[in-house]
Each structure stands twice: as structure tokens, then as C-alpha cells.
Image (cartoon, helix red, strand yellow):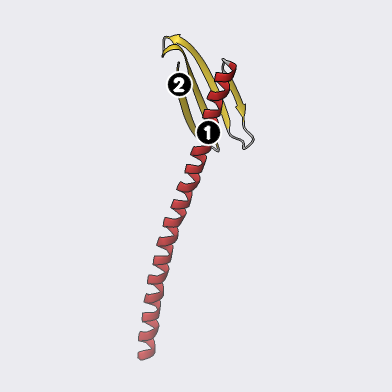
């Protein structure tokens, strides 16, 4: 009778340990995905910022791809209409691994 009880307690204890380990691993996996997404967001934002800088330098709409694979596309809109700037508006969209971030300036 004692052998059956110890086996039962062992199975219960192992089930509790396994459930705890699975719970912790699912939390860690979701946190790792969040950290990856934040990194992609930062790269997309800096791609958009790079696009704004190049458009300011060239004075026209530009697009391109950076060495890390991030892409940017900038649209220059003259003042008036949808642009509330005094001279023009620049809207840059950066993309990196499916994450898109945008930057807009008015001048």
C-alpha cells in the first residue's frame, strides 16, 4: 500500500513541476517576441529618419534600402491642402521585417 501512495505523490509532484515549467517558458517566449518586435520597431523608425534626412538634403521625394535591409520612402508635399506647413511637408515611412514606422515634419 505504501508503494502505491509514494508513486501517486511522485506523479502529482512531477505534474506540478512540469506545469510550472511550461508556464514560465510560455511567459519567456512571449517576452522574447516583444523584445524582437521592439528591435524591429527601432530599425524601422531609424530608416524613416534616414529617409527624412536624405529628402531634406535633396529637396525632393526619395526612397531607398539601407545596408541592414530596412527600407524607407519619403513623400514631399507642397504647402496647402493636406500640408499645414508654411513651405512643405515631408512624410517618411520606414519598414523593417514587417514593422512600419513613420515620421512627418513640416517646414
Position of residue 75 relative to residue 18, above or below, is above
Q: How many numbered circles are shown?
A: 2
Residue 34 x %, y %: 45, 47
Q: Residue at x 50, y 46 (%)?
A: 36
Position of residue 26 relative to residue 38, above or below, is below
Q: Residue at x 40, y 71 (%)?
A: 17
Report the quarter where the C terminus lies.
top left
Who is closer to the viewer here, 77 or 11?
77
Q: Please give the residue where the numbered disc 2 appears in the rendered image.
A: 105
Q: Please give the residue where the numbered disc 1 appears in the rendered image.
A: 46
Helix or strand or loop: what does disc 1 sit on?
helix
Position of residue 58 relative to residue 13, above or below, is above
Q: Earlier in the sequence, mark 1 or mark 2?
A: 1
Whether residue 53 sits left or right of residue 15 in the image: it is: right
Report the quarter where the N terminus lies.
bottom left
Helix or strand or loop: what does disc 2 sit on?
strand
Q: Residue furthest bottom?
A: 1
Who is closer to the viewer here, 4 or 57?
57
Q: Residue at x 47, y 47 (%)?
A: 35
Residue 94 x %, y %: 53, 30
Residue 96 x %, y %: 55, 36
Q: Dot 2 surroundings within 10 Å: few (below 14), some, or many (20 or more)?
A: few
Q: Quadrant of residue 8?
A: bottom left
Whether residue 89 sits left or right of residue 16 in the image: it is: right
Alpha-carbon span between mark 1 and mark 2? 15 Å
Position of residue 13 relative to residue 28, above or below, is below
Amino acid at each position: 500500500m505504501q508503494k502505491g501512495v509514494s508513486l501517486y505523490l511522485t506523479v502529482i509532484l512531477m505534474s506540478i513541476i512540469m506545469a510550472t515549467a511550461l508556464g514560465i517558458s510560455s511567459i519567456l517566449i512571449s517576452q522574447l517576441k516583444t523584445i524582437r518586435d521592439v528591435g524591429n520597431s527601432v530599425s524601422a523608425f531609424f530608416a524613416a529618419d534616414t529617409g527624412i534626412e536624405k529628402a531634406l538634403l535633396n529637396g525632393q521625394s526619395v526612397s531607398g534600402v539601407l545596408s541592414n535591409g530596412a527600407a524607407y520612402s519619403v513623400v514631399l508635399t507642397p504647402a496647402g491642402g493636406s500640408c499645414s506647413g508654411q513651405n512643405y511637408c515631408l512624410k517618411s515611412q520606414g519598414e523593417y521585417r514587417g514593422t512600419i514606422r513613420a515620421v512627418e515634419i513640416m517646414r
